[in-house]
Image (cartoon, rainbow, N blue to C red):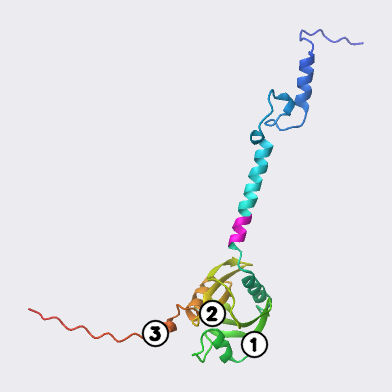
Amino acid sequence: MKHRAPTTEPEDSAFDLRARAELALAFDATDAPPHLYRKAQPLLARRGFQRAMLGLLLVGSGSGAVLAMRPPELVRGAIEHEYFERTLRGTFMDPAPLLQHLGLGGKQVVPGFPQLMRPCDIDGHLVYHLTTFFEKGGMVTVFAFDKAVALNEGGGWWGDVHWRVITSRDGKPLVLVAQKKQALAVAQNQFGTTGDALTSPSTPTPAPTPKETR
């Protein structure tokens, strides 16, 4: 039988045993059990409450940013419609009424290289759908509405595409959808109020009179 060597360490007191038991518990070192504090911690001073509030602030700010960039419901419907008809090609209506609703009633030719022309339905609205290709911009889809709708000008990125709401030359909103942002710029120049064709012919300026030379 082996005997343990005598030790000079004092035996654990009741305080030591309790402190060791408390330290063995699984809790965050920065947030000890309340009964260890002489005075109860204020709610705002507790780390758990602080972390919960920080998480709520982050979630709220993230949700606010998403909602701020979210396009109007009618634009989201147009983006979804464009996605499902992206590979569809053909001419399913005469160019004249399409040009009229695009605000280009005075033109005879659809801008770009038309890939798809058809009437369609988006969220209960009769819409005229034009997909055309611009050599210096790329493919773009333009939606013109048969009746007046409330859409403010704006744009952004949603559903892996760029979108933009512009005002046509007859004052109606048009929705542009494209995978390339440059295509939107070219389309806006063709269909929007800033188009080159919108500018009225200027009055010819008389040639300046040559100054006398002395």
Tell me if residue 139 comes above or below residue 36 in the rendering: below
Marks 2 and 1 close (CB-CB < 8 Å): no
Of marks 2 and 3, which one's residue comes earlier in the chain?
A: 2
Label 1 neighbourhood size at 10 Å, few (<14), some (14-19), many (20+)? few
Residue found 68% across the figure and 42% down from its top: 52
Is residue 65 rendered magenta in the image? Answer: yes
Mark 2 Cα-neighbour bin, 10 Å: few <14, some 14–19, many ≥20: many
The residue mark sitting in front, 1 or 3, is 3
Q: Quadrant of the C terminus?
A: bottom left
Residue nearest the observer in this picture, 161 or 36: 36
Q: Nearer the viewer, mark 2 or mark 1?
A: 2
Query: Which tag, 1 or 3, sits closer to the chain's start?
Result: 1
Question: Pointer 3: residues within 10 angstroms few (<14), some, or many (20+)?
Answer: few
Q: Amino acid at mark 3?
A: Ser
Q: Label 1: which residue? A: 90
Residue at mark 2 to residue at mark 1: CA–CA distance? 25 Å
Q: Which numbered disc covers residue 157? A: none
Secondary structure at numbered mark 3: loop
**Residue 45 image offset from top left, x and y in percent:** 64, 33
Residue type of the residue flagged with mark 1: Gly
Q: Position of residue 187 (x, y in %)?
A: 51, 78
Q: Is residue 92 above or below residue 173?
A: below
At x 78%, y 20%, the residue is: 18
Q: Please name the residue that numbered disc 2 is placed on.
A: 172
| Residue under label 3 | 200
